[in-house]
Image: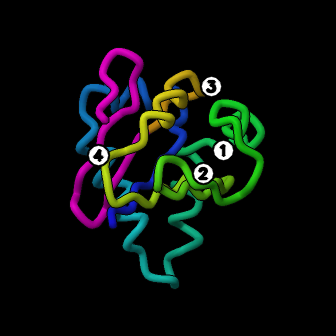
Amino acid sequence: MKKYYIFSINKEFYKVYKENPTILFKTLFNLYSLKLKHASNGLRVYNQLCNTINKQVIENYLETKSKTNVIDNSILEINTSCLILLTKNRIPKKIVNLVYYESPLFVVDFENKNYFWLKKDKVRI
């Protein structure tokens, strides 16, 4: 099963990283891998880089109303820090609706070191 984290990226940082997502991935991976004793510094960096997730907007896009949702045999957990998608298959087509979200979304699979922007013109499914 693959585990994707979907982050809402601050628009100013999007301008910096949109052409070089590898640096953004490395930054998020470093935050993901931080030891607990460094968590407060990591949280400060994370809060500058990422926006909180607007749960109500996400629920409207996906037409759902619960914290954990089953979408095309995949599970989507909606948190204020990020979305977490667990899937055995490809990313569900319904996730494509998130391209219209209020800020750019960056999709990361930390385990397989895979990452991409969720874009209107280049949705990877």
Q: Which residues are magenta?
A: 106-125
Q: Earlier in the sequence, mark 2 or mark 3?
A: 2
In the foreground, 123 or 90: 90
Residue at 53 percent of width and 27 percent of height:
97
Residue 50 drawn at (x, y percent):
55, 45
Gap between marks 1 and 4 measured at Cα? 19 Å
Circle 2 is placed at which residue position?
47
Point out the frontmost of discs 2 and 3.
3
Circle 3 is placed at which residue position?
102
Disc 1 residue crowd, few under 14, some 14–19, many 20+, Cα 10 Å: many
Circle 1 is placed at which residue position?
53
Gap between marks 4 and 2 measured at Cα? 20 Å
Q: Amino acid at mark 3?
A: Glu
Residue at 30 percent of width and 21 percent of height:
122
Point out the frontmost of discs 2 and 1.
1
Q: Amino acid at mark 2?
A: Asn
Marks 4 and 2 in Cβ contact (< 8 Å): no
Q: Amino acid at mark 4?
A: Tyr
Circle 4 is placed at which residue position?
115
Q: Amino acid at mark 1?
A: Ile
Quadrant showing the N terminus: bottom left
Q: Earlier in the sequence, mark 2 or mark 1?
A: 2
Q: Secondary structure at mark 2?
A: helix
Gap between marks 2 and 3 measured at Cα? 17 Å
Residue at 51 percent of width and 83 percent of height:
36
Say if the magenta span includes residue 87.
Answer: no
Residue 66 drawn at (x, y percent):
75, 54
Residue 100 drawn at (x, y percent):
56, 21
Q: Secondary structure at mark 3?
A: loop
